[in-house]
Image (cartoon, rainbow, N blue to C red):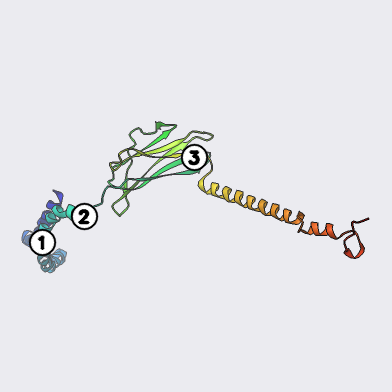
């Protein structure tokens, strides 16, 4: 293959450089007074370097085919892994872009399709370019634009050799997860404040509260209770 021919081509180039003086010596001897002999002098100075470099390329010519045959054994064996999916909405002006992210899968063959209310939209083939992460797994993404004011449900479906059936994740218009969390915390705080208000009001109006004690002590000067008997 190309990996075997490359060292041989470099060896041929080195042999041509070593034969540089022999081939072009008469020409440079004739033109030596004009060019000062600098090129010939430098060529002679580099000859020991090329002679030392030739054994290295000889070893490389034998090493490259060996590495090419042993490469599958030396590469890490990554087991098949299914993809993980997540839909991230991103608003750009009035339109909304939904991006389906797939990551952590191996091998690289993956198909991502968008479905709108259960119907495939966009590219029917769904072929997505998978990029390596560096740990033997890959990631890919597919984006679709959602018209403003739509109430449709969108789903991202992934086909992968490690899956027996397609994997899908659904997105519907509504509050984002972060906004839903803030709304939940606000409602919880409101309920807690209402509970504390009712609890304090009951304590104030109860027999042991401030209003109950004020009713028991009024009627006589000095704050003594009035005798109910006639």
Q: Residues within 10 Å of mark 3 (few under 14, many from 20)?
A: some
> Depth check: 5 or 51 in front?
5
Q: x and y percent of residue 54 in the render?
A: 10, 63
Q: Which mark is residue 212?
A: none
Q: State if disc 2 and disc 3 touch (CB < 8 Å).
A: no
- Residue labelled with disc 3: 96
Give left or right: position of 226 versus 179: right
Q: Which element is circle 3 on?
A: strand
Q: Position of residue 179 (x, y in %)?
A: 55, 47
Which sits earlier in the primary sequence, circle 3 or circle 1? 1
Of the pair 113 and 23, the residue shown nearer to us = 113
The structure residue drawn at horizontal position 73% and vertical position 56%, both measured from the top left corner, is 203
Helix, strand or loop at label 2? It is loop
**Around disc 2, counting alpha carbons within 10 Å, would you say few (fewer than 14), some (14 to 19), or many (20 or more)?**
few
Q: Earlier in the sequence, mark 2 or mark 1?
A: 1
**Residue to which mark 2 is pinned:** 75
Camera-nearest label, 3 or 1? 3
> In the rendering, at what x and y percent does residue 106 appear?
29, 47
The residue pinned by badge 1 equals: 59
Measure how far apart labels 3 and 1 are at the Cα level.
Answer: 59 Å
Q: Which one is in front, 57 or 149? A: 149
Residue at 27 percent of width and 47 percent of height: 80
* Marks 3 & 1, CB-CB < 8 Å contact: no
Along the viewing direction, whichever of 206 and 30 lies nearer the viewer: 206
- Which image quadrant is residue 55 in? bottom left
Within the image, what quadrant is residue 128 found in? top left
What residue is at 54 percent from the left and 34 percent from the top?
Answer: 149
For this orientation, the residue located farthest to the right is: 230
Left or right: where 152 falls relative to 158:
right
Question: Which one is earlier in the sequence, the residue at label 3 or at label 2?
Answer: 2
């Amino acid at each position: 293959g190309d990996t075997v021919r490359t060292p041989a081509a470099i060896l041929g180039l080195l042999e041509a450089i070593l034969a540089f003086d022999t081939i072009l010596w008469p020409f440079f001897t004739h033109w030596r007074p004009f060019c000062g002999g600098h090129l010939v002098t430098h060529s002679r100075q580099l000859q020991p370097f090329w002679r030392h470099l030739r054994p290295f390329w000889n070893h490389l010519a034998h090493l490259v085919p060996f590495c090419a045959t042993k490469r599958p054994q030396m590469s890490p064996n990554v087991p098949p892994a299914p993809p993980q999916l997540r839909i991230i909405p991103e608003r750009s002006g009035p339109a909304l872009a939904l991006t389906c992210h797939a990551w952590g899968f191996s091998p690289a063959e993956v198909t991502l399709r968008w479905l709108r209310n259960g119907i495939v939209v966009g590219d029917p083939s769904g072929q997505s370019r998978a990029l390596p992460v560096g740990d033997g797994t890959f990631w890919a993404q597919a984006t679709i634009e959602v018209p403003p004011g739509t109430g449709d449900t969108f789903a991202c479906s992934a086909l992968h050799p490690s899956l027996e059936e397609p994997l899908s994740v659904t997105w519907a218009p509504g509050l984002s997860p972060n906004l839903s969390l803030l709304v939940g915390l606000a409602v919880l705080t409101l309920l807690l404040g209402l509970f504390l208000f009712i609890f304090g009001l009951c304590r104030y109006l109860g027999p042991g509260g401030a209003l109950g004690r004020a009713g028991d002590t009024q009627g006589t000067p000095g704050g003594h209770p009035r005798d109910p008997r006639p």
